[in-house]
Image: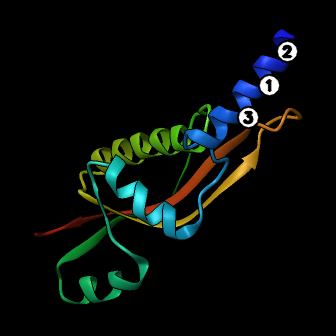
Amino acid sequence: MKLLYLSLFFTFSTSFFDCQSSYSPAKMYKVLPTLTKSKLVLQSEIDSLISADKCKYLTKGRSYAAPIGLFAKNDLKNAAKGIDEWVELDKGNTYVLTNYKWVPADHLGSTQLYVDFDTLYCTK
C-alpha cells in the first residue's frame, strides 16, 4: 500500500511541479537569461553588435558540463552558474549560447546538461 501511495505522489508531483527532463529551444532561451547575471545575446544579433563595435569576443567555443540536478530546471540553474563563472573569469559580461544538449549520464535515465557558448564583452 505504501508503494501505491508513493507512486501516486510521484506521478502527481511530476505533473504539478516543473519536472521536465529537457527544455525546448523557446523555453531554454526564455528561462536561461533569468538564471544568469550575464547577459544572453542571441546568435542572430551578434554579428550586428560586433560590426557596430558594441561587443567583442573574448572566448569562442567554451563548453560546460553542468552538475546533474534532480530536474531540468535544476540542471539549468547549474548551467547558469557555470556560464556566469566562465564569463566572469573571461572578464566579460555577455554570452552567446551556441548549443545545448542533455546527454544520458547513466543506465538509470539520468541526464547531464552540456552547454556550448561564447563569452563577450559588450558596452551598454
Describe the element under mark 2 as helix, strand or loop. helix
Foreground pick, 15 / 86: 15
At 40% from the left and 85% from the top, the residue drawn is: 44
Foreground pick, 103 / 55: 103
Q: Is residue 47 above or below residue 21?
A: below
- Residue 48 position by quadrant: bottom left
Circles 1 and 3: CB distance less than 8 Å?
Answer: yes
Q: Does residue 1 appear left or right of residue 39 in this picture?
A: right
Upstream in sequence: badge 2 or badge 3: 2
Describe the element under mark 3 as helix, strand or loop. helix
Q: Position of residue 86 (x, y in %)?
A: 38, 46
Residue tagged 2: 3
* Gap in angstroms between the C-alphas marked 1 and 3: 6 Å
Badge 2 local density, few (<14 within 10 Å), some, or many (20+)?
few
Q: Does residue 12 appear left or right of residue 2 in this picture?
A: left
Look at the image and tell me whether residue 29 can be seen: yes
Identify the amino acid type marked 3. Answer: Thr
Q: Does residue 75 appear left or right of residue 77 in this picture?
A: right
